[in-house]
Amino acid sequence: MINSSKKISMKDIADELNLSITTVSFVVNGKSEEKSISPATVKKVNDLIEKRGFNPNSAARLLRTGKSKTIGLIVEDIGNYFFANIAKTVGKAAHKNGYSVILSSTENNDATARELINKMKNSSVDGFIITATHGLFKEIAKLKKENVPFVLLDRIMPGIETNHVILDNYSGGVQLTTHLVNNGYSKIGLVSVVSQMSNVIGRENGFLEAMRAAKLKVPAKTILKFPFGESRLDTIAAIKRYLANNPNLEAVFFTTNDLGVLGIEAIQESNLKIPMDIAVVSFDDNDLFRLLNPSITVAAQPIREIGTRAIELLIKLINGEPEMDEMTGVTIKPTIIIRNSSPKKILQRR
């Protein structure tokens, strides 16, 4: 008996009915009459296909072309504004090119990421777009060794040369910080996440470089970092303590939009006003940042371009286009959007 939790294959159908895969294939492809397969056998095959939830169209295409026309998209957090919109963009671009997308989130968990890759490989996806977690080195190396088409998105994997589409996070960090410095702010704090991934490190290094270039000090107590997955209430409480312990801060740089949203809530609960008491900038845009009063200055990621470039690159890899013999890296510049949360420095009330 076939395990109903397992992906059903044409071989499973053939084995359960004690038929050859060829016979099942003829039925699936509508060639039963041409190949003189009895109506009773056709009925048995079709009945079992329906019972087991077997997708004969996908199976026939896979058998015929070696391609399932599906892509695996693995992101960090589908609830995040950036990744949700990346998924939407990739889905639209994939559909336009005749592909469907299987989407899953890792929640920045290495074990979950490994499991998702293995499950999608077993589902015969043609290729992957992956937001890699730090501990995924072996799995990424294995995909490369096996010549599985894949594109890393948002961050690269140190030590492995791969096809990738990423943002110039360092440049964005420099530009956001320089904007604050040029507007007269010198005591600037950083709120970030504990991460060894290239995107976060790039943003932090950009901040530190801009502060160094301006000959401004960054005391250790003005840097706050959170582990991934910290609860909303704990994050807000920690930012409130951070603000209380740094009463002379003139501005704060949040390295993700999620932290930016929670940081604004913490600032409000601390009875501070933006930008009169403290200026705010954030990496990644969010609809909320545009609608708030004051609106929030950001380094925005061009989501449509990132998603579109990733799917276009992956499809070229899947199709084995000659020019794809070498690894391709695409680095896209962020867009700095100046809004009302970081004007020319005004008299601080604290």
Image (tube, helix red, strand yellow):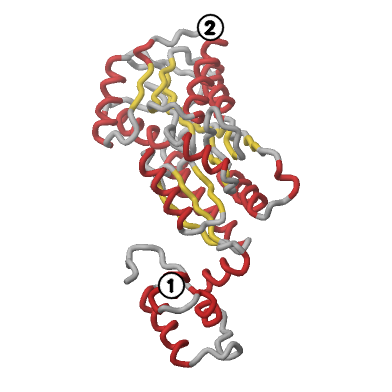
- The amino acid pointed to by label 1 is Phe
Residue under numbered circle 1: 54
Name the one closer to the observer, 322 or 249: 322
Name the one closer to the observer, 287 or 345: 287
* Category of crowding for the residue at label 1, using alpha-carbon neighbours closer than 10 angstroms: few (below 14), some (14–19), many (at least 20): some
The structure residue drawn at horizontal position 32% and vertical position 71%, both measured from the top left corner, is 1
Indicate the quadrant where residue 35 lies: bottom right
Q: The residue tagged with tag 2: helix, strand or loop?
A: loop
How many marks on residues? 2
Whether residue 256 sits left or right of residue 66 in the image: it is left
Position of 27 relative to 81 (above/below): below
Q: Is residue 78 visible?
A: yes
Q: The residue tagged with tag 1: helix, strand or loop?
A: loop
Horizontal and vertical percent for residue 259? 38, 33
Position of 122 relative to 300 (above/below): below
Position of 54 relative to 97 (above/below): below
Can you tell which mark lies on residue 215?
2
| Labels 2 and 1: the sequence-earlier one | 1
Which quadrant would the C terminus be assigned to in this image? top left
Whether residue 256 sits left or right of residue 300 in the image: it is left
Name the one closer to the observer, 261 or 223: 223
Q: Given this view, does label 2 or label 1 mark the residue nearer the observer?
A: 1
The structure residue drawn at horizontal position 49% and vertical position 8%, both measured from the top left corner, is 216
Whether residue 91 sits left or right of residue 276 in the image: it is right
Indicate the quadrant where residue 230 lies: top left
